Amino acid sequence: MSQTVGSTVLAYARVWHHVDASDRVLGKIAERIALVLMGKHKPIYDKSLDCGDYVVVTNAKNIKVTGRKDEQLVYRKHTMYPGGLKETEYKDLMDSKPYEIIRHAVSGMLPKNKLRERRLSRLKVFAGSNMGIYRGNIVKRWEDGTLTDADILKLDPKYRARQSSKS
């Protein structure tokens, strides 16, 4: 008996999504990006398969945070040496590396397992509107951060078979 879950050919068919982060709330956009990176928007999703898509985020410097987080939010990391706690405020990180803010938020919403780094490598974040070489790969653009039911149905092979038999 085979141990394969689902059709692996369909699982690895990856689509490139473009997200414009201008005037979008950080937590809400990060949640939706994490779902696409995991592949939960696909009908063939299985937690043991890495079936997520690529996501290209532009205009990271224009992202919004709610409340007083722009004044109070602090990013911390430790070098593992005594006295090695490094703290960076949100404003400083926004000025120097705005792409790291979105990457950090999405990383926190992905499951902490062996697939995490592979999923994060499919996330491409740019501070401005220029996405460089990735522009030609974009298949889907979603303005409000959600995939419509029609988009999800189009990914289903049974739905495509029904549509082709009707025409």
Image (spheres, grey):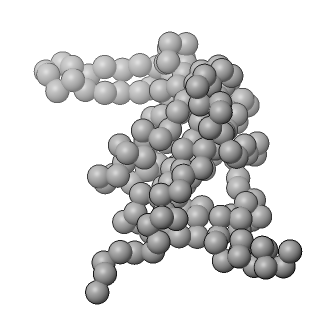
Q: Using residue 48 as the reference point, say whether residue 7 is left or right of it.
A: right
Estimate the x, y position of residue 35 in percent, counting from the top left: 55, 54
Residue closest to the far left: 82
Is residue 166 or residue 22 the one in the foreground? 166
Is residue 162 or residue 50 the one in the foreground? 162
Is residue 25 or residue 74 the one in the foreground? 25
Q: How many marks?
A: 0
Q: Using residue 166 as the reference point, say whether residue 85 is left or right of it.
A: left
Q: Using residue 100 as the reference point, say whether residue 153 is left or right of it.
A: right
Residue 29 visible in image: no
Residue 146 visible in image: yes
Location of the N terminus by quadrant is bottom left
Estimate the x, y position of residue 163 in percent, counting from the top left: 79, 74
Location of the C terminus by quadrant is bottom right
Q: Residue at x 31, y 27 (%)?
A: 77
Estimate the x, y position of residue 21 in percent, counting from the top left: 67, 33
